[in-house]
Image (cartoon, rainbow, N blue to C red):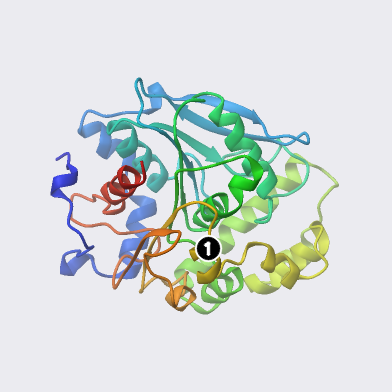
């Protein structure tokens, strides 16, 4: 069934059997998004063109552009940590947006989407300059269209920073949306370290694979021996900052992308946030004091939803997709 905005409720109320935050989180990453959309007669992959973007200072990032004739706007999607343009939540959101009349670009952050050999230095979460460079390059495809940015998890943090810092960098989105955004990095890493073993193991496996792929792509440049010896993400991040970043301490690094409610409310351009109180990765207390006012056009914090989940029925529809469309139309 293809839903319309009229089918969409004002709040997220999943059926009882779908209220587990673990189940919500797993379905978001494992549901067969492309197959589900193909059953509805929609497949954006043949319509999408791969691009390598010149982001300035010799940095290149990649992504997939899916143009739309007479588009309502251009939406740049940013995946979560260790995700990519192929992530199920990313692909499904792109299909929903494209179906409703938007051009879409699914951006890969540095060292994501199989691009470990593209840039010598490693990805880290404070690399905003290259994200601005990528968005400027993407805007050149559709220069007259209003810009929107939507990100998930760590990508949600990037999206919110685009809204907050973009106007000063010549990037002016009409709206930037963070879905389950990781706004306080230390708290997020502590939640992963102290949370469900399933998710801790998942992220640890992903990070170790990245270390392997980066080492293979740049022989002799990286030595991750002490990183591999730890299973604590706060400690691993400290090692990474000390060994392979320009920051003196891990606290300096965290400060570069920690966002507070006051910062969000005073953003230079409009923002919206969708999060869940049962998210085991993003503590809901990080959003204390936030509401839909000032620069925050929308703030949704529901009892259920998990991390980037918000699966609203047994057909595996994501509540966030029509909600994002509502927000984009409200901001237009």
Q: Nearer the viewer, residue 67 or 34?
A: 67
Q: Is residue 162 visible?
A: yes
State the image coordinates of residue 11 (x, y, percent, origin top left): 22, 63
Q: Quadrant of the N terminus?
A: top left
Indicate the quadrant where residue 272 lies. Answer: bottom left
Q: In the rendered view, does 56 fall on the left or right side of 104? A: right
Q: Quadrant of the C terminus?
A: top left
State the image coordinates of residue 269 (x, y, percent, origin top left): 50, 51
**Which residue is at 33% across, 37% downward?**
97
**Which residue is at 63% across, 62% downward?**
257
The residue tagged 1 is 266
Q: In the rendered view, does 85 fall on the left or right side of 61? A: left
Q: Is residue 203 above or below residue 167?
A: below
Q: Is residue 197 above or below residue 99?
A: below
Question: What element does badge 1 sit on?
Answer: loop
Q: Is residue 295 above or below residue 52?
A: below
């Amino acid at each position: 069934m293809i839903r319309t905005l009229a089918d969409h409720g004002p709040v997220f109320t999943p059926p009882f059997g779908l209220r587990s935050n673990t189940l919500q989180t797993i379905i978001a990453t494992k549901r067969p998004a492309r197959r589900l959309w193909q059953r509805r007669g929609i497949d954006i992959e043949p319509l999408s063109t791969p691009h390598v973007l010149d982001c300035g200072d010799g940095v290149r990032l990649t992504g997939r552009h899916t143009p739309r004739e007479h588009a309502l706007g251009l939406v740049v999607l940013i995946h979560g940590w260790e995700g990519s343009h192929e992530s199920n939540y990313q692909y499904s959101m792109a299909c929903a947006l494209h179906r409703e009349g938007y051009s879409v670009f699914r951006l890969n952050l540095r060292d994501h989407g199989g691009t470990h050999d593209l840039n010598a230095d490693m990805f880290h979460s404070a690399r905003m300059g290259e994200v601005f460079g990528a968005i400027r390059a993407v805007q050149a495809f559709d220069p007259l269209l209003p810009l929107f940015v939507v990100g998930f998890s760590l990508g949600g943090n990037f999206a919110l920073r685009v809204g907050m810092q973009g106007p000063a960098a010549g990037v002016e989105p009409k709206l930037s949306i963070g879905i389950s955004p990781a706004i306080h990095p230390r708290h997020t890493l502590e939640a992963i370290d102290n949370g469900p073993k399933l998710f801790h193991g998942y992220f640890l496996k992903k990070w170790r694979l990245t270390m392997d792929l980066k080492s293979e792509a740049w022989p002799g440049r990286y030595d991750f021996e002490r990183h591999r010896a730890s299973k604590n993400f706060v400690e691993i991040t400290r090692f990474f900052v000390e060994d392979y970043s320009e920051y003196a301490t891990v606290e300096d690094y965290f400060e570069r992308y920690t966002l507070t409610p006051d910062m969000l409310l005073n953003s230079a351009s409009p923002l919206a946030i969708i999060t869940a109180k049962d998210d085991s990765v993003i503590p809901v207390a990080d959003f204390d004091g936030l509401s839909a006012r000032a620069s925050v056009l929308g703030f949704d914090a529901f009892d259920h939803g998990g991390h980037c989940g918000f699966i609203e029925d047994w057909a595996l529809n994501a509540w966030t997709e029509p909600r994002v469309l509502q927000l984009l139309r409200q901001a237009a």
